[in-house]
């Protein structure tokens, strides 16, 4: 009597689609517009409709009721882009295997991260949330827009951005896997070996599926091969569907990876950190590889001891498309200042320095058709500053993403947390001892930086 | 794009040829910096004036200054003379490479090691030192860290071949006032665990202090023949107010507790860190205790705090009447001190006060204001000449003097720039020079 | 105020069976398989107003309800005059019946000599066994159920008759089952095995997948391969010249999921957990239920269509600040006031701190939002069930009442505990209401069930009757000064007069704050357990229980003593054997 047959559940359909992006209309009046790609325009208006830049010019007409922003005496620049950060994600390193291309940090977006608001308050509208550097091939990264205030994690995704993936050379993968767990790689030779192996497995895997797809036409009973997201991702890299973003420091390891990529016919790569990029700048330029660097970080470990703050200048002068990134929740708040340091270290011109945090990172992330400069048709991602953004005395005034004001100095309450822990008495105090981005989630093993 | 870069290369080859491949050394002697703007810090700004440097000392400053015979004249037209910047807290000279612990000489084992003397471990030949000084930072506090009493910090000039040559006349015992906050985001201790650890450390601090008192009493009763006890002996000068203590406290409640402790024990102290000083600025001002705070370029200490709270911290304390000096708390990037000061200036402190916070104020706090911190006759010649505001990133430093030595503006980083800006050979497919 | 109210309710009821002829007792046979509840105020389903009715249950099934019905002669009659009858609760997401896990002291974390925790090496890092990876979809919850586990009786006493139970574990712990909460062994409890797959965001820690991103990737791969397996097996069955499919225990176990025969119950307390689970569902298309949700109001729109059913957690955040305030007040006199000269520095306490007020406001708002989750979802007409998996039995009433206080109607609460979970679990034909033909699962309470002073007098679970004697447990200790507890602290000798002999031994009571711990020592006791339980001391009355093993059977001893100075007297009830008198004296006080 008790053993009755079962009827479980009603109808299930899939409903959780990627959420709709909110977009706004507004007009910015009479600003000094630093377009980056088309020079500096004084006393100029920018008209924004549906989250896009509709027109740039003098005395533009806007529809009645459109929000007006008076930028007289202010500097208006494209929203800053950080090509290397770890904000807004809950997981950084799946450090349990040297090769984990199948994991995606986009699966762990944290829309509540106060770091996103702080980045907005520094004029940053887009960042590249990266997997960490524990593994020789880490996970896939996620380019995000700083739509702080949206609750749905998927609403942060920069939908037109191509896929990117983290590689890491040198000390970090060696320390985590070779020293920490006793598996390859323990040396830079080993790093090359495991990367080559992964590419080779990707080729084999691709071949297996190609044969299956072809064979299925003749024999519908052909069973499918075992699915492997790890090697499928390697195959996607080989097919040019994913841009490699490689954590690297030393000149030799950079050349090593260039050789590996040549052998496998892979072309799209940006080297990250790349502190010794300046030593192989001609090779990087000849390959068409790009470089995303720190303004001045060095000496935090041996592989960055022979660095120079002139790195960005040397790379730029050698024709390498270069950006300056943060890799830090602290630096991301003042990337405009980090870019300005290239004027001390090598004397880059204003537009060259600003390109390092706008159009160049956009190129590296494959989103330069959408963002990175103030041009008609591009997304209305805009940062407004009190003074020239490269001056130490400038203060960010307003940051706009898709035509919506996400930061406004004049309307900026102290406590900008979205989620408040109901069991917490007062907000927690955190000291300044930080484990920085790249090695987060690995602190159980080591607490090194970057 | 390639064409443009080739063109640019041609220009830069010229630049390269100018820089000769020889080791430039520091020079001592008589110098006249003429036609200069002078930011004296203590006596306003002078235009079209001269600074005379002789025997390591600023001999004269002013408009109508006699240039001594044999002086090397440096024309400073369109340039400005600034006193060398002073960083109130670093590990410079005590650490070479962050991840390699055998190069860390600031962190001795033990909770109670005030006798550890940072000056002993200063590496005058650290590659980090020239990288720092070429940005105008001429003196820093090199400080030990870790434990309750990590050791004794020293003020050093960033030039010299021995620690003694570098020593700038001030030492202070470092006390880490027990923290009741999380160290960082990775700190997974529960609130209860943190509280317990804090209470335990405070007991230890007070127990230690009681012993120092007993030791001092016995030492004076026995006319200096107390038992050998270097840890306690090192704290006696602090107990007796003859030596300054740097008391590190950052969280609001820790700052207040540290102030109470300092007042109760009547010691001569400087509060360091003071990240949440803005929350209790009036209490600090009332206590009269000076503060060394920084880095300015740091994160707010709580998620609920304004994004720019750390930028504003120094200014809020200074406006409340606290004597505020700045520090980077850095090692390899102490060169960012002027930028830290620039952010403090922008976020409430103002240019003038921010400049003081990295020159005369730290000199005063360290009791060396007769020697450092301003451009005045009779002071040590620690100064630099720049083509503009040193807080502005675009500004270039043109001349640098430390302890009267004219120091070359060269570091490994500039040498790498010189070598690699236009590499020869370039890519392997490049034509060797002269073969086309 | 809310809290106080919760407290008085959480003073749970001491549960003692009384021999009145029919209720289930371990060692006595059931008299009849028929029960009649006569003239009870019947709420037959959520939303119905109480109607005086009679309900007849025969062989576990409700055979008649209504007025003027003839009561069968073999029925055991319960006089319902002063009682309310409700359909018994269905727990949509539960761990009832699962043995309490031993404390996970050996979590595998080792400490480096330097003090930093270090991960031990893994044999096959990145490629761990399925068990190490926490991927065990092939495990059925049945293997971890203990029919004698206390939680079954405890949740039954709270009104639950049916529970959907899922196993403990990591990312994919295994398959869930439906239990009916009455029975002597697992088969009697078990209604249906393998009704669901349970998954949660709980990484393998030491090996792959350790993080959120690893788990997402692993789920995708498992799902794809299970799908391929389905294809491969079909081909293998229907065609020749096909190689045998690789056998993988996890892929095999997931095949009913990819074939959409088995839903995945995804434990997703926080809003991000929910969103990530939904992303998986969106990408892979499995049938999914979001379970144990504590922040679902943020995702309300996603649940409107009802295509992803929702189970709310009954857990609520506690207001820490209140308990802290109490503690501070208690500790206040201990702290030494600062010397005068320093008063101004520390004196800001006197001044109102606007920052602190702002924090408090936000925190209270957050507390309110959590408590109002159910009410707000109900307002938006989003159907949901409740699950008990993340709460203690003693918090059930307290939290339900907090939710009702925030605007959840008692009817909505009742439906989330009856008809909604019945529908969700596909058992609405059999359970969830009191109607002819449904399973005989009925709560009989002295007042409307979600009223503050309501308590359950009888539970009928599939025709098995349980009766509860209501004895309000007093708060363990008086509020001020703990001297009165010292009255019992120390070691006491006792003597029990039983017909055949005098049994002697000692009790030892230790006081720790408001907690009383007790042990019994006697030559009669051969089992390992010495701990006294349910110790309550108020004015002079001391009561406690002790589980005593006789010939492999557990017998509960219930002590009720009156303490006077250094001696006590009272009674001890030994299971169903009877009640005997007991006396004793204090032989040792605790050392000061």
Image (cartoon, coloured by chain):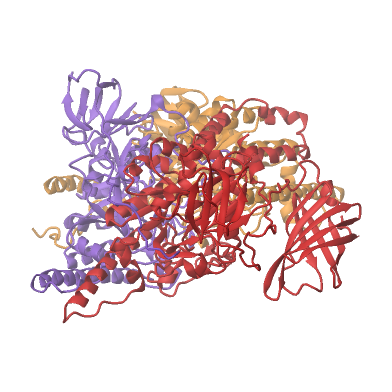
Chain colours: A purple, B orange, C red
Determine whether A385 is above or below C515 in the image: above
Determine whether A164 is above or below A372 in the image: below
Let me know if residue C154 appears in the view: no
Residue B92 vs residue C592, the one in the foreground:
C592
On the picture, is A74 further left or further right than A317? right
Locate residue C35, reporting x and y percent. Answer: 56, 56
Let me know if residue A338 appears in the view: yes
Q: Residue at x 68, y 69 (%)?
A: C554
Residue A322 vs residue C213, the one in the foreground:
C213
Determine whether C22 is above or below B331 in the image: below
Locate residue B91, reporting x and y percent. Answer: 52, 50
Question: Tag count in the figure?
Answer: 0
Residue that protrudes farthest toward the bottom in the picture: C241
- Quadrant of the snapshot with the C terminus of chain B: bottom left
Q: Residue at x 38, y 36 (%)?
A: C380
Residue A91 vs residue C400, the one in the foreground:
C400
The quarter holding residue C357 reads top right
Locate residue A447, reporting x and y percent. Answer: 48, 58
Residue B233 vs residue C426, the one in the foreground:
C426
On the picture, is B319 further left or further right than A133? right
On the picture, is A5 further left or further right than B277? left
Locate residue C439, reporting x and y percent. Answer: 47, 56
On the picture, is B328 further left or further right than C217? right
């Amino acid at each position: 009597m008790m053993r009755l047959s079962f009827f479980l559940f009603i109808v299930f359909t899939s409903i959780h689609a990627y959420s709709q992006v909110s977009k706004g209309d507004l007009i910015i009046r009479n600003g000094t517009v630093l377009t980056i790609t088309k020079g500096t325009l004084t006393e100029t208006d920018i008209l924004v409709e549906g989250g896009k830049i509709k027109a740039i010019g003098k005395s533009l007409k806007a529809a009645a009721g459109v929000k007006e922003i008076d930028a007289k005496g202010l500097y208006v620049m494209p929203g800053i882009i950080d090509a290397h950060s770890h904000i807004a994600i809950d997981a950084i390193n799946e450090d349990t295997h040297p090769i984990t291309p199948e994991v995606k940090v986009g699966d762990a977006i944290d829309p509540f991260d106060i770091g996103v608001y702080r980045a907005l308050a520094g004029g940053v509208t887009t960042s590249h949330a990266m997997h960490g550097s524990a593994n020789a091939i880490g996970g896939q990264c996620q380019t995000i827009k700083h739509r702080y205030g949206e609750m749905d994690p998927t609403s942060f995704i920069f939908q037109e951005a191509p896929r990117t993936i983290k590689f890491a050379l040198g000390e970090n993968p060696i320390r985590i896997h070779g020293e920490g767990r006793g598996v390859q790689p323990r040396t830079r030779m080993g790093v090359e070996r495991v990367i080559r192996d992964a590419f080779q497995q990707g080729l084999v895997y691709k071949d297996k599926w190609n044969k299956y797809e072809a064979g299925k036409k003749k024999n519908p009973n052909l069973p499918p091969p075992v699915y492997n997201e790890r090697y499928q991702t390697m195959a996607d890299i080989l097919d040019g569907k994913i841009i490699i973003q490689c954590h690297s420091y030393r000149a030799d390891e950079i050349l090593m990876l260039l050789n590996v990529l040549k052998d496998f016919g892979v072309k799209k790569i940006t080297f990250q950190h790349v502190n010794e990029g300046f030593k192989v700048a001609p090779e990087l330029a000849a390959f068409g590889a790009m470089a995303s660097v720190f303004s001045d970080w060095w000496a935090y470990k041996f592989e960055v001891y022979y660095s120079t703050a002139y790195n960005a200048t040397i790379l730029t002068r050698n024709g390498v498309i270069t950006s300056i990134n943060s890799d830090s929740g602290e630096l991301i708040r003042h990337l405009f200042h980090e870019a300005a340091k290239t004027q001390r270290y090598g004397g880059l011109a204003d537009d060259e320095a600003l390109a390092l945090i706008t159009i160049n990172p956009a190129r590296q992330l494959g989103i330069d058709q959408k963002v990175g400069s103030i041009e008609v048709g591009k997304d209305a991602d805009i940062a407004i500053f009190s003074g020239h953004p490269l001056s130490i005395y400038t203060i960010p005034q307003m940051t706009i993403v898709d035509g919506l004001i996400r930061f406004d100095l004049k309307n900026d309450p102290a406590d900008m947390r979205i989620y408040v822990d109901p069991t917490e008495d007062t907000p927690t105090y955190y000291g300044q001892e930080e484990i920085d981005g790249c090695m987060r989630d690995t602190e159980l093993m080591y607490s090194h930086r970057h | 794009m390639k064409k443009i870069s080739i063109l640019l290369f041609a220009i830069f080859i010229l630049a390269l040829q100018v820089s000769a491949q020889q080791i430039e050394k520091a020079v001592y002697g008589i110098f006249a910096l003429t036609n200069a703007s002078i930011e004296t810090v203590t006596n306003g700004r002078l235009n079209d004036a001269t600074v005379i440097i002789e025997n390591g000392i600023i001999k004269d400053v002013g408009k109508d200054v006699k240039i001594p015979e044999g002086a090397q004249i440096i024309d400073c037209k369109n340039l400005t003379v600034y006193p060398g910047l002073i960083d109130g807290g670093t590990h410079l000279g005590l650490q070479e490479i962050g991840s390699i612990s055998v190069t860390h000489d600031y962190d001795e084992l033990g909770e109670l090691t005030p006798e550890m003397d940072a000056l002993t471990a200063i590496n005058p030949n650290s590659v980090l030192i020239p990288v720092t000084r070429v940005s105008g930072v001429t003196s820093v506090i090199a400080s030990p860290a870790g434990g309750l009493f990590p050791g004794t910090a020293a003020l050093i000039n960033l030039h010299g071949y021995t620690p003694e040559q570098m020593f700038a006349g001030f030492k202070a015992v470092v006390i880490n006032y027990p923290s009741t906050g999380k160290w960082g985001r990775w700190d997974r201790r529960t609130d209860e665990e943190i509280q317990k650890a804090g209470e335990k450390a405070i007991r230890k601090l007070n127990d230690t202090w009681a012993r120092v008192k007993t030791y001092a009493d016995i030492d004076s009763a026995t006319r200096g023949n107390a038992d050998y006890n270097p840890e306690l002996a090192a704290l006696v000068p602090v107990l007796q107010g003859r030596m300054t203590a740097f008391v590190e406290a950052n969280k609001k409640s820790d700052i207040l507790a540290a102030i109470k402790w300092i007042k109760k024990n009547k010691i001569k102290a400087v509060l360091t860190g003071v990240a949440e000083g803005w929350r209790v600025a009036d209490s600090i001002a009332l206590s009269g205790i000076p503060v060394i705070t920084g880095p300015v370029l740091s994160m707010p200490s709580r998620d609920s705090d304004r994004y720019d709270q750390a930028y504003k911290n120094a200014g809020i304390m200074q406006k409340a009447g606290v004597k505020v000096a700045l520090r980077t708390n850095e090692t390899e990037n102490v060169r960012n001190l002027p930028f830290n000061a620039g952010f403090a200036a922008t976020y409430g402190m103002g240019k003038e006060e921010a400049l003081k916070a990295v020159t005369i104020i730290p000199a005063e706090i360290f009791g060396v204001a007769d020697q450092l911190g301003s451009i005045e006759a009779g002071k040590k010649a620690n100064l630099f000449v720049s083509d503009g505001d040193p807080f502005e990133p675009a500004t270039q430093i043109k001349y640098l003097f430390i302890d009267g030595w004219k120091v070359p503006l060269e570091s490994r980083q500039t040498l790498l720039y010189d070598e690699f800006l236009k590499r020869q050979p370039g890519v392997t497919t490049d034509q060797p020079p002269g073969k086309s | 105020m809310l809290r106080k109210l919760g407290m008085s309710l959480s003073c749970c009821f001491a549960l003692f069976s009384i021999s009145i002829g029919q209720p289930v007792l371990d060692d006595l046979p059931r008299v009849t398989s028929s029960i009649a509840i006569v003239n009870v105020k019947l709420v037959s389903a959520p939303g119905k107003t109480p109607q005086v009715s009679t309900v007849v249950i025969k062989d576990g099934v409700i055979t008649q309800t209504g007025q003027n019905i003839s009561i069968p002669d073999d029925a055991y009659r319960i006089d319902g005059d002063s009682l309310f009858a409700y359909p018994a609760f269905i727990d949509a997401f539960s761990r009832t019946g699962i043995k309490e896990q031993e404390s996970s002291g050996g979590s595998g974390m080792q400490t480096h000599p330097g003090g930093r925790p270090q991960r031990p090496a893994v044999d096959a890092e990145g490629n761990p066994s399925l068990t190490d990876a926490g991927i065990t979809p092939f495990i059925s919850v049945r293997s971890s159920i203990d029919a004698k586990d206390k939680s079954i009786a405890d949740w039954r006493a709270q009104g639950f008759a049916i529970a959907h139970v899922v196993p403990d574990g990591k990312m994919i712990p295994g398959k869930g089952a439906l239990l009916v909460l009455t029975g002597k062994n697992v088969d009697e409890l078990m209604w249906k095995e393998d009704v669901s797959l349970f998954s949660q965001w709980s990484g393998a820690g030491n090996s792959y997948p350790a993080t959120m991103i690893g788990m997402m990737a692993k789920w995708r791969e498992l799902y794809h391969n299970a799908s391929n397996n389905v294809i491969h097996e079909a081909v293998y069955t229907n065609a020749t010249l096909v190689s045998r499919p690789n056998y993988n225990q996890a892929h095999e176990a997931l095949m009913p999921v990819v074939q959409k025969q088995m839903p995945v119950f995804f434990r997703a307390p926080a809003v991000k957990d929910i969103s990530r689970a939904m992303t998986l569902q969106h990408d892979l298309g499995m049938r999914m239920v979001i379970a144990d949700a504590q922040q679902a109001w943020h995702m309300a729109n996603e649940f409107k269509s009802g295509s992803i059913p929702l189970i709310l957690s009954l857990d609520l955040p506690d207001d820490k600040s209140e308990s802290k305030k109490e503690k501070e007040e208690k500790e206040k006199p201990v702290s030494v006031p600062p010397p005068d000269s320093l008063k101004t520095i520390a004196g800001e306490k006197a001044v109102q701190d606007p920052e602190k007020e702002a924090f408090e406001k936000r925190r209270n708002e957050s507390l309110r939002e959590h408590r109002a989750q159910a009410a707000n979802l109900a307002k938006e007409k989003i159907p949901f069930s409740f699950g008990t998996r993340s709460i203690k039995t003693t918090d059930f009433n307290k939290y339900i009442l907090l939710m009702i206080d925030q605007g959840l109607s008692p009817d909505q609460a009742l439906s989330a505990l009856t008809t909604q979970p019945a529908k969700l679990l596909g058992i609405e034909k059999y359970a969830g209401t009191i109607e002819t033909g449904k399973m005989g699962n009925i709560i009989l309470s002295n007042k409307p069930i979600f009223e503050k002073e309501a308590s359950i007098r009888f539970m009928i679970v599939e025709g098995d009757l349980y009766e509860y004697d209501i004895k309000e447990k007093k708060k363990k200790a008086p509020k001020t000064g703990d001297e009165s507890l010292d009255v019992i602290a120390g070691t006491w000798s006792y003597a029990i007069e039983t017909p055949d002999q005098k049994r002697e031994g000692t009790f030892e009571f230790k006081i720790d704050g408001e907690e009383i711990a007790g042990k019994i020592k006697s030559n009669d006791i051969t089992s390992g357990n010495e701990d006294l339980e349910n110790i309550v001391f108020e004015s002079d009355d001391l009561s406690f229980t002790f589980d005593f093993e006789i010939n492999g059977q557990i017998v509960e001893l219930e002590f009720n003593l009156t303490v006077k100075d250094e001696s006590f007297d009272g009674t001890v009830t030994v299971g169903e054997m009877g009640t005997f008198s007991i006396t004793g004296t204090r032989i040792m006080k605790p050392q000061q």
